[in-house]
Amino acid sequence: MNKKCKRFVIKIMQGGDKMRKISYAAGLGICLLLCACSQQKPIRLLADAEIVSTDSQNQTITVRDAGETTVFGEHGTADCSKAALSAYNSDSGKTQEIGFEDLQVGDYVVIGLYENEKAQAQTETVHAESVKRMRQKSAQD
């Protein structure tokens, strides 16, 4: 129970006429209902990855972990159909929107997803909230 709900309960317990107590009790019921129904924001997780393959029909990318992250392992799939796709330009320091077709095998990306999907990332397709291409595959790669 949060602080506002506790203060409200204390107010009800203090004296007053019968109608007032009934009003407070109804308000308490509503407050408790709202407290019970409120959900905390899920924790957002950013994972560094390298694209291993793309599926333009399903708008999914198969990736492996890059850097020190351990979310996808050697093989994980992210559904990008509803994700915000962007590319970071290191020369200008700016980010611009891109389309799914701009993502290529070998690109290094940062995938935004919710922490509750981390456990499934190596075995199931997870839903990416965002995909930011940090480094595009170059001719030398």
Image (cartoon, rainbow, N blue to C red):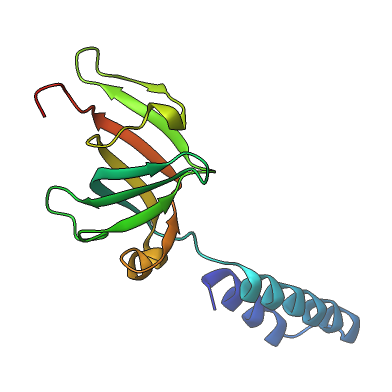
How far across and how far down the image is residue 7, in percent? Answer: 59, 74
**Is residue 72 shown left or right of residue 131?**
left
Judged left or right of residue 43, residue 90 is: left
Q: Quadrant of residue 69?
A: bottom left
Outermost residue toward the right?
19
Q: Residue at point 54% right, 43% down?
A: 82
Q: Quadrant of residue 18?
A: bottom right
Quadrant for residue 105, please give it.
top left
Query: Residue 44: x and y, percent?
Result: 38, 54
Quick one: 66 or 53, which is closer to the camera?
Answer: 53
| Residue closer to the observer: 19 or 107 | 107
Q: Residue furthest top?
A: 92
Residue 101, given in percent of the width and then of the height, sits at 43, 29
Drawn side of residue 127 relative to residue 112, left or right? right
Picture residue at 11% right of the left edge, 29% below the top: 141
Is the residue 92 above or below the residue 120 in the image? above
* Residue ID at (82%, 79%): 26
- Quadrant of the rendering where the N terminus is positioned: bottom right
* Relative depth, front residue between 64 and 2: 64
* Residue 72 percent coordinates (x, y): 27, 59
Q: How many marks?
A: 0
Q: In the rendered view, would you say 119 is above or below 65?
A: below
